[in-house]
Image (tube, rainbow, N blue to C red):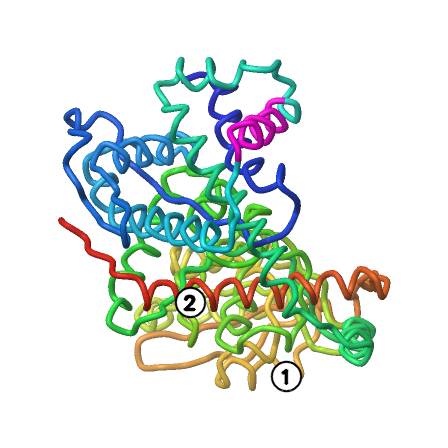
Amino acid sequence: MTTMNKKLLAFICFALCLSFGTDALCAPKKSTAAKAPEPSPVNIVATVGPDVISDYDLTARIHFVMKSSSIPDTEENRADFRNQILDMMIDELLKKQEAKRSGIENSANEIDDAIGKIEEQNNLGRGELKKQLQDMGVSYDTLRSQVDADLAWLKYTRMVLWGGVNISDAEVKEKITEFSAASDKTSYNISEIFLPVADYTKDAEVYKTALDILKALEEGSDFPSLARQFSESASATEGGDMGWVTEGSLDKSLEDSIALLSAGQISLPIKTSAGYHIILLKDKKLSSTAKQFELAKVTVPAAYKEKNPDFITELTAQKTCSAFIALGKKANDEGSGMLGTSLLSALPDSIKALLENVGEGAISAPLSSEEKDIFFMVCKDLTGKAGNLAIPSEDKVKQMLEAQKAEMLARRKLRELRRSTIIEKRF
């Protein structure tokens, strides 16, 4: 597949929701298989109330997701993501059924117009997208089915659920106050992939999916594409982009993990009461008060120190981090190097005590054990070098809070539909 076609597929995943509006309530999608044996259309893999999902439909969706997310198309990956994708297809049917009960259905022209917007945003002529997908071996009907489900649920959310959204002036002012106080807190520019655990019996299954997604990222898959396909947070339609968030605004387990990341790093799956999160840290703005350092570390094994009695004196006399690390690698190559930017408050208590009063360019006392001594050098003291975040207008804040509440109502409604509908998987 050409690079242009891969980018086109990734764009399609984004445009499926963007074309209908920036509301974060469009359903995220999931992955599928490519060169499996040709499935039979009459082989039913799931029933959802009166509707069915065939093995043919599931295989077509897996193929689409593999292509759009750049997930290596292997038997192992198809098996890993098969159940997760089926769950998403079940959710799409539940959404269409509920919308239909409220008298909401999409005409063929409406679906065509939505796809036409995708083509327009991708500089394609009318009908060109269908040909592009066919050339890549991707089912056009799969795309239409996704557009149909997303558009119906978006209409339902706006026409039915939105009436339950009421944001007071007090809530808006409280949120603006939080933004105003952000300059005294560390802020993180992050993206996330969120996998909810609605039923504790599914915890292990969801965690395995999180590990499969992490594996796909390690193999080169694009974070935004995977977020649009798999994440079930409000940020899914934006490729997982949550923008800037401030210290204290997230679950503590998330903040503790994010604080240990350097820009460009991706976290391991992080468990919260809601589910599992995979976080990409894109950038950070430092608090104007919290102590933060750019650190280097050198590990000196006890055996090396015993053989080289003058080494510690020479090491602690170094004036730059590059010289400190270069010398440290003579003692232990793997245990010496840059640690990146660290909040003092996020470090283990044993290390925090060593660095409390260490200034820029200075080296800490050792963290000692029988096997080794570990020294830390403060390459840069970044305390007080935070950038201020722009405070959004009242209208923007109100829109943001409305979208969050509407998304919460939509998620709650979907949970009710899962409980009240007879659903049977047949594999």
Q: Which residue is mark 2?
A: 270
359 to the left or right of 144: right
Q: Position of residue 11 (x, y in %)?
A: 55, 31
* Residue mark closest to the camera, 1 vs 2: 2
- Specify whether residue 149 is painted magenta: no
**Image position of 365 with respect to 162: above or below:** below
Looking at the image, which is closer to me, 269 or 124?
Answer: 124
Q: Is residue 318 visible?
A: no
User: Residue 233 location in percent, x, y?
Assistant: 51, 59
Instruction: Determine whether 187 is above or below 242 in the image.
Output: below
Kindly state the secondary structure of the residue where label 1 is placed.
Answer: loop
Q: Amino acid at mark 1?
A: Glu
Is the N terminus in the top left, top right, bottom left or bottom right quadrant? top left
Does the rendering let one see residue 121?
yes
Q: Position of residue 210 (x, y in %)?
A: 35, 56
- Amino acid at circle 2: Ile
Which residue is identified by label 1?
A: 356
| Few, some or many residues within 10 Å of mark 2 (<14, 14–19, 20+) | some
Residue stretch rendered in magenta on the structure: 107-119
Between residues 214 and 404, which one lies in front from this camera angle? 404
Q: Quarter of the image holding residue 126?
A: top right
Q: Which residue is at the front of the view, 226 or 127? A: 127
Asked if the magenta segment contains residue 110, the reply would be yes
Residue pictured at 60% horizontal, 24% vertical: 116
- Compared with 228, 347 (above or below) is below
Cα distance in 3D space between marks 1 and 2: 28 Å
* Residue at (59, 63) in percent of width and height: 161
Residue pictured at 28% horizontal, 68% vertical = 203
Q: Quadrant of residue 354?
A: bottom right
